[in-house]
Image: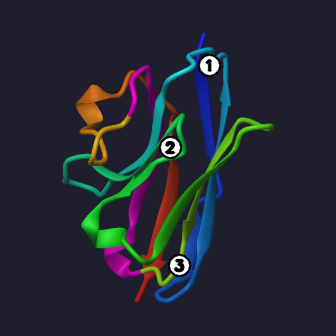
Amino acid sequence: QVQLEESGGGSVQAGGSLRLSCSASGYTYSSYCMGWYRQAPGKEREGVASRDSAGRTRYADFVKGRFTISKDNAKNILYLQMNSLKPEDTGMYYCAAASFTCGDYVPRHLAMDYWGTGTLVTISA
């Protein structure tokens, strides 16, 4: 059974940084796509960044140059380093996984098979 657990959320001021972690277990697919998604109150869940089993990464335009997705394969942990945070980055951040190779864009959230419960990120002006 695939389990994803996020951590690292918190409250910081605009311009600050946070690093989110997603611990994955029970994942045995040789090809996969993992990603970070976020959802602000009253808004649809949106893709932030993705990384596939070949190490290819994709980012939403609104985080390019500020966020970095990476993975420690030995520990099976997916990270999201977030720098130059803005108030509009506030939301619940989710880790997700699917048994396909990510395409040229961060997959829509409806395409992902497995989800963590989320970690809250709050950015104050």
The residue to which callout 2 is attached is 118
Asked if residue 24 is positioned above or below residue 78 in the image, the reply reads above
**The C terminus lies in quadrant:** bottom left
Q: Looking at the picture, how far across and down is residue 49, in whole percent?
A: 40, 53
**The N terminus lies in quadrant:** top right
Q: Residue at x 39, y 23 (%)?
A: 100
The amino acid type found where label 1 is placed reads: Tyr
Q: For numbered disc 1, what is the local secondary structure? A: loop
Q: Residue at x 54, y 34 (%)?
A: 53
The amino acid type found where label 2 is placed reads: Gly
Marks 2 and 1: CB-CB under 8 Å?
Answer: no
49 sits left or right of 17 in the view = left
Q: Residue at x 58, y 17 (%)?
A: 2
Residue at far right of view: 74
The amino acid type found where label 3 is placed reads: Asn
For the magenta stretch, what is the residue range? 86-101
**Mark 2 crowdedness (10 Å alpha carbons): few <14, some 14-19, many ≥20:** many
Calculate the distance from the C-alpha at mark 2 to the C-alpha at mark 1: 18 Å
Marks 3 and 2: CB-CB under 8 Å?
Answer: no
Q: For numbered disc 3, what is the local secondary structure? A: loop
Asked if residue 67 is positioned above or below residue 55 in the image, the reply reads below
| Closest to the observer, 115 or 76 | 76
The residue to which callout 1 is attached is 27
Asked if residue 47 is positioned above or below residue 121 in the image, the reply reads above
* Quarter occupied by residue 99: top left
88 sits left or right of 29 in the view = left
Marks 1 and 3: CB-CB under 8 Å?
Answer: no
**Mark 1 crowdedness (10 Å alpha carbons): few <14, some 14-19, many ≥20:** some
Calculate the distance from the C-alpha at mark 3 to the C-alpha at mark 2: 19 Å
Q: Which numbered disc flags the more N-terminal residue, 3 or 2?
A: 3
| Closest to the observer, 109 or 100 | 100
Q: Looking at the picture, how far across and down is residue 84, in whole percent?
A: 48, 84
